[in-house]
Image (cartoon, grey):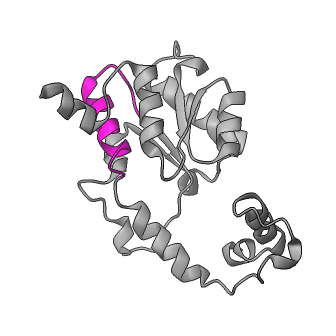
Amino acid sequence: MFKADLERPDLWAKFHKEKLNVLDATKVPAVPDIDAEKLYWTMMSTSRTPDPHMYPALKRLKADGRYKLAALSNTTIFPEGHEFNEVRPDDVKNIFEIFVSSAHVGMRKPNRNIYEYTFKLIQDTWGQDIQPQDVVFTDDIGENLKTAKSFGWRTIKVTLGRIKDAVKELEKVTGLELLEAEQTKARL
C-alpha cells in the first residue's frame, strides 16, 4: 500500500504543480518505479537520529520540571529481534513520560479516537484538572494538527527542514530558552 500511494499519478501531478510549479500536465514526468521497501527502511533509519533542535529542546523542557511530556506517534511494530526494537540511550522515547504508539493501541492519527485515548491517559496520569487547552501538540502533518486543534489542543506546525522555527514557537509558549545556540550565547 505504501508503494501504491507513492506511485499514485494524481499525487505525483499535484506535487509537481504545487511544489515545483509545473502547470502544464504534459510536462509532468512519468511516475517512477519507487523501491518502497528501500525508501521505508531509509526513513526508519533516519527517524532514529535525534533532531539537533527538537531533541535538546525536549530535554530542557523535561529538566525544567514544570512541563509534562507525552508523545502521540504513528508507529510501526518491527519484527521480534529487529535492531530497531532496541531502545538506545538517545532514543527520543526516553524523554516522554507517556508514549502512545499507534501500532500498539490500534489507532492512528489523524483519527479522533487516538487523541481522545491520549488525553484520557494524560488526565488519568497527571490529573483530571488538565484541560485540552493545556496541551501543546506539535506535528509535521496538517491533518494531524487539524484534529488536535478541533479537540481544543494548541498546535505548533513542525516543518521538516525548519524544525528550529517550531522550537522557537515552543519557546514562546513555555517562556523557556530551548535552542542550544541561544543558551550558549546567553552564557558568554
Q: Which of 126 and 67 is in front in this view?
A: 67
Residue 146 spot, x, y in % from top left: 70, 36
User: Which residue is drawn at the image coordinates 38% and 61% (left, top)?
Assistant: 48
Is 60 one of the magenta-colored residues? Answer: yes
- The picture quadrant where one finds residue 148 is top right
Residue farthest to the left, as pictured: 188
Q: Nearer the viewer, residue 151 or 56?
A: 56
- Check the image and report above or below for 25 versus 90: below
- The picture quadrant where one finds residue 29 is bottom right
User: Which residue is drawn at the image coordinates 34% and 54% (left, top)?
Assistant: 50
Residue farthest to the top, as pictured: 129
Q: Give the range drawn in magenta.
A: 51-70
User: Which residue is drawn at the image coordinates 45% and 45% (left, top)?
Assistant: 163
Q: Quadrant of the N terminus?
A: bottom right
Residue 158 spot, x, y in % from top left: 53, 43
Residue 27 spot, x, y in % from top left: 82, 77
* Image-based side of 53 in relation to 11, left or right: left
Residue 79 spot, x, y in % from top left: 46, 74
Residue 78 visible in the shown view: no
Is 3 one of the magenta-colored residues? Answer: no
- Check the image and report above or below for 141 versus 82: above
